[in-house]
Amino acid sequence: MKILTGIAGMSMAVVLIAAGCKTSELKRTNQALDYCITQLSKTIGTLHDSTRMPRSIANGKTDWRLVGYRDWTSGFWPGILWYAYEYTHDEQWKQQAARYSNTLFPLADTAAIDHDLGFQVFTSIGNGYRLTHDPTYRSILLRTADTLSKLFNPKVGTILSWPRAVPGVDWPLRHNTIMDNMINLELLFWASKNGGDKRLYDIAVKHAETTMHHHFRPDYTSYHIIVYDTATGQKVKGITHQGYSDSSMWARGQAWAIYGFTMVARETGDTRFLDFAQKVTDVYLEKLPADLVPYWDFNAPDIPNAPRDASAAAVVASGLLELSTLLTDAAKSNYYRTKAEAMLVSLSSNKYQSREVNNALLLHSTGHKPNGGEIDASIIYVDYYYLEALLREKRIKEGGMKK
Ligand code: GLY
């Protein structure tokens, strides 16, 4: 073999080192994905009824708590199965994904009880349609988008997130919108591009604009809920339901904002949303602890003893990988991508992966701290966004990410 010397030799060495780094980086991602498949196989072995979806495993327990299709988390398990099929190309995962997805079909034509239809149907049947182009899935998605759009209040300019009693919100005089609702706009964008009414696009954009104007404090930290006057559309107040206080930064709420405004920037190509996604991201990144997994609320009074929320880290890792692909500023793009990769390294460590503790993918998430629900637990949506982030990371490393 000829030994290269001088500039040519040095640049060849740089290329070889870079190629080596890329290969070992991809190896890490694939190892984490293989770990996910091992854990999912364990869970599948314990389930016998495709109408019951795994939702969470309480701290210290090993069995999944199962829920029916009306629960807001019902789409994540079928969505995880579609991602397992996407990674492995194994027909057995596809069959399981289809079985569980079918359970959700009634949501398309049942009056919406809240904004969560996107979480339920787009994570599951949306991924199913992306991977199979099954026309039944397309029809379900279009009908669900129409059902969700019925909660839009044009006076306010947002979807009514919770059409039921909420502490601090005297419904029906008051209209409420929660930060989480941003994620469900993706179903409306999809429908408007796939045969649905153009109005669905306008609703999604209006909701995002109104949220951008009213849902944030001057430092770009998010309120959980904004209460509006139903009749006049005026903002009344910002409050919390799942955070520590009305003025605190609830970790998952900020994570939904990062992921949601990034998705809206992708769908609209509008730089207002792209700029805003960076602002809500930067305040989150500035305040993270060293391992990049936040405490459940950034203002929790008992930090550093407060419970963590790995779910926020998984949602943000996935969102930041996408954000890095939307930016033309190479330095900023690299910054977000490097942060996302570091979050995935942290989540893939023995501190956060469940491994032998239980059959979930990750430990240490917090669902609803104020009401004592799912604290320091394994939760299905965490696993969904962790798996999604790993697949996005793999796609980026292999040379291109297209959603
Ligand atoms: N969307 C409900 C939650 O984030 O807990």
Image: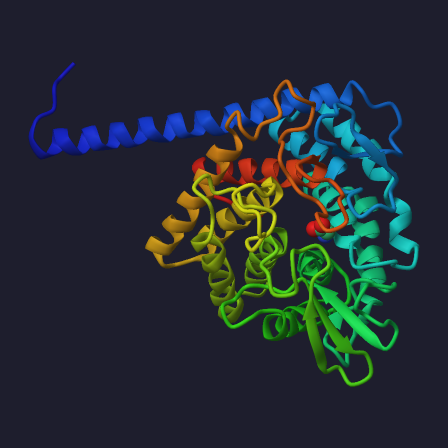
User: Who's the residue at 51% across and 61% down the image?
Assistant: 280
Q: Nearer the viewer, residue 157 or 353?
A: 353
Say left or right for 164 vs 344. Answer: right
Q: Could you tell me if residue 177 is visible in this image?
A: yes
Q: Nearer the viewer, residue 165 or 22?
A: 165
Say which quadrant the N terminus sits in. Answer: top left
Q: Residue at x 51, y 72 (%)?
A: 218
Q: Position of residue 360 (x, y in %)?
A: 68, 28
Residue 7 falls left or right of residue 202: left
Quadrant position of residue 382: top right
- Residue 93 vs 249, above or below: the answer is above
Q: Residue at 54% across / 35% down in the picture? A: 390
Q: Residue at x 77, y 22 (%)?
A: 44
Q: Is residue 35 left or right of residue 90?
A: left
Q: Is residue 132 visible?
A: no
Residue 377 drawn at (x, y percent) = 69, 35
> Exactly how many numbered labels are in the figure?
0
Residue 146 versus residue 62 in the image, above or below: below
Between residue 224 and residue 2, name the one nearer to us. 224
State the image coordinates of residue 306 (x, y, percent, origin top left): 59, 43
Please state if 340 lies on the left or on the right of 375 as rendered. left
Q: Position of residue 84 (x, y in %)?
A: 66, 29
Which residue is at the front of the view, 247 or 12?
A: 247
Measured along the vertical axis of the image, is residue 247 above or below residue 104? below
